[in-house]
Amino acid sequence: MCNTGVKSGTEMYAKLYPETSSDGVLRLGNIVPDFSAETTQGHMDWHKWIEGSWAILFSHPADFTPVCTTEIGRLALKYDELKRKGVKLATLSADPVESHNKWLHDVVAHCENKVTIEFPIIGDADRSIAVKYGMLDPSNKDSNDLPLTIRAVFIIGPDKKLKLSLNYPASVGRNMEEIMRCVDALQLSAKHSVATPANWPFNHDSIGKKGWAFLLPTVTPEDAKLHFPDHHTCKVPSGVDYLRLTDVSKLQPN
């Protein structure tokens, strides 16, 4: 059932976040910083490159490091799927492009699947982009030590606003399935007035509602009945009808 006329989750929650930061710290809802840089695929003007698409900026501490090598390989396996979802992908490392190009031979050789690296890797040897995105404290910008704080993921909407960010320590590799899940959840909420529960899309299997999503609290009972006639309300001791699930497979694009 189409939910035309009911604002999407992104529309509703966007009002909670300012477009710009008052203290220079990048937060959800902010328009992400622009930059120009050299990449393994040539020069890039970031905002122009994003223009009208979803995008992921995926950063690494350094080339020729073990965890990063596996992450680039696993990202490559998801690249076609990301393209089908309308998501552009760029990665970043605090090394020059020449180093990236040498390192990629190792990435391809180590990944057991025969991958090709079709997305750009940004050179950030002076760590200026890492500082802009809050991945590195400005006081450490010129440090010769390994910048371990910049293993990060930024998912950015077509409006160039930050929709989700993840930060990992150097010792923990990122799970590509979780990143894909986040993309799916964000795109779902961008189209419909829903929010995804914990462990979505494997939630609520015990009541036969696996993969269903919650209606936003802003959806009135009248709109819920009109636009989501098959929604299910989970009964709880409080008696408040706020756990309202709807079958996302039946939702049509607005």
Image (cartoon, helix red, strand yellow):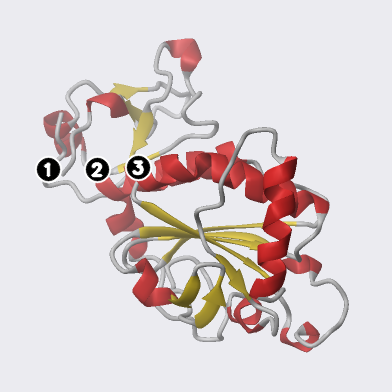
Q: Front-most of 31 and 207?
A: 31
In the image, what residue type sits under mark 1? Thr
Q: Residue 58: percent from the left, percent from the top?
A: 59, 59
In this view, the mark in front (1 or 2): 1
Q: Residue 32: percent from the left, percent from the top?
A: 46, 74
In which quarter of the view is residue 142 placed? bottom right
Q: Residue 239: percent from the left, percent from the top?
A: 39, 27
- Name the secondary structure under disc 1: loop
Residue bearing mark 2? 219
Residue bearing mark 3? 84
In the image, what residue type sits under mark 2? Val
Check whether the beta carbons of the residues at disc 2 and disc 3 lie within 8 A of each other. no
What residue is drawn where x is 72% and y is 44%?
A: 109
What residue is drawn where x is 74% and y is 51%?
A: 106
Tell me: residue 25, above or below residue 252. Answer: below
Q: Front-most of 81 and 138?
A: 81
Check whether the beta carbons of the residues at disc 1 and disc 3 lie within 8 A of each other. no
Q: Front-most of 195 and 89?
A: 89
Residue bearing mark 1? 4
Q: Going by the image, does 152 lie left or right of 30?
A: right
**From the image, which quarter does the C terminus lie in?**
top left
- Count of marks overlaid on the render: 3
Q: Residues within 10 Å of mark 2 (few under 14, many from 20)?
A: some
**From the image, which quarter does the N terminus lie in?**
top left
State the CA–CA distance, disc 1 to disc 3.
Answer: 24 Å
